[in-house]
Image: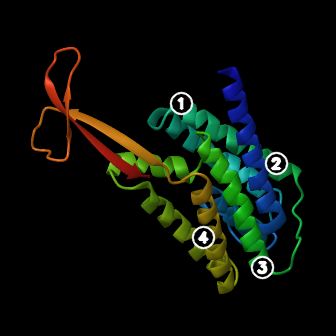
């Protein structure tokens, strides 16, 4: 149990490092925005820097501040274990964003969007795979989904759509398109890591004789005739 929890924390830290690398080495310097609260933090940092001349409020600091009320919400509405690991991811991401310098490896924005999207996707994907999240919009979308009984994806799409729109307003319209490319790449990588297809066999034991495709079976305890239905699903 201890080794499993330690491994989960290690994965969360690795995911946080990858997210920080994607942001500081590729996305921030190119004015390409990430998804969720990370992208919102980038937008706010841009506004503070470009419009108010305040450069001391970085993306990492804003990401941490924005996630404090979300962590409280997740603690009561989503689950304590999930929220704890998600907030750990936020803490380490914010920390590494402050430690790593903001550099620019390439002048081509599309390269920054693609490589940043891939690295961010790997970071988010492995974090989700091990039972945590990167906080922010994930927790908000889960809470709204439970309250409104609607899919999480719709809320995440609305948040990311707003980020794309603001990216085009704050910078050139092309930045919105590059942000869209980065978000698409990130989503595809997350799907490849976290949402993999698995074959599942479901066995249903019933007394209902309407199922012509079921196999006859006699119970060992009560010696009653039952029917066993085998179904195969790919999820």
At x 59%, y 69%, the residue is: 163
At x 34%, y 40%, the residue is: 202
Tell me, yes or no, whether the two marked residues, 4 and 3, touch with CB atoms within 8 Å. no
Dot placed on the residue nearer the N-terminal end, 2 or 1: 1
Tell me if I can see residue 66 in this picture: yes
Dot placed on the residue nearer the N-terminal end, 2 or 4: 2
Q: Which residue is mark 3?
A: 109
Numbered tag placed on residue 80 in the rendering: 1
Dot placed on the residue nearer the N-terminal end, 2 or 3: 2
Q: In this rendering, would 24 be left or right of 84?
A: right
Q: How many marks?
A: 4
Q: In this rendering, would 221 be left or right of 27?
A: left
Pick the front one: 114 or 192: 192
Question: Callout 1: 10 Å neighbours few (<14), some, many (20+)?
Answer: some
Q: Secondary structure at mark 4?
A: helix
Q: Which residue is mark 2?
A: 96
Q: Which residue is mark 4?
A: 184
Screen quadrant of the N terminus: top right
Q: Is residue 116 above or below residue 123?
A: below
Dot placed on the residue nearer the N-terminal end, 3 or 1: 1
At x 60%, y 70%, the residue is: 184
Tell me, yes or no, whether the two marked residues, 3 and 1, touch with CB atoms within 8 Å. no
Using the rendered view, name the quadrant where residue 14 is placed: top right
Q: Secondary structure at mark 3?
A: helix
User: What's the colour scheme?
Assistant: rainbow
Dot placed on the residue nearer the N-terminal end, 4 or 1: 1
The residue sitting at the top extreme is 221
- Distance from Cα at disc 4 to Cα at disc 3: 15 Å
């Amino acid at each position: 149990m201890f080794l499993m929890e330690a491994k989960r924390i290690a994965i969360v830290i690795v995911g946080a490092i990858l997210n920080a690398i994607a942001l500081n080495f590729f996305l921030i310097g190119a004015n390409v925005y990430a998804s969720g609260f990370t992208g919102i933090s980038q937008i706010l940092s841009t506004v503070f820097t470009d419009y108010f001349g305040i450069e001391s409020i970085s993306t990492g600091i804003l990401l941490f501040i924005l996630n404090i009320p979300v962590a409280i919400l997740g603690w009561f509405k989503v689950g304590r274990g999930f929220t704890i690991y998600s907030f750990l991811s936020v803490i380490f991401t914010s920390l590494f964003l402050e430690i790593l310098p903001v550099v620019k490896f390439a002048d081509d924005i599309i390269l920054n969007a693609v490589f940043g999207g891939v690295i961010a996707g790997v970071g988010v994907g492995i974090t989700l795979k091990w039972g945590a999240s990167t906080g922010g919009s994930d927790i908000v979308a889960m809470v709204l989904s439970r309250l409104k009984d609607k899919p999480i994806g719709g809320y995440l799409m609305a948040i990311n759509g707003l980020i794309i729109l603001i990216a085009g307003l704050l910078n050139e319209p092309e930045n919105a398109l590059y942000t869209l490319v980065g978000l698409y790449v990130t989503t595809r990588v997350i799907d490849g890591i976290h949402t993999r297809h698995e074959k599942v066999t479901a066995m249903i034991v019933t007394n209902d004789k309407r199922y012509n495709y079921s196999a006859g079976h006699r119970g060992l305890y009560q010696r009653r005739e039952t029917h066993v239905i085998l179904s195969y699903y790919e999820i």
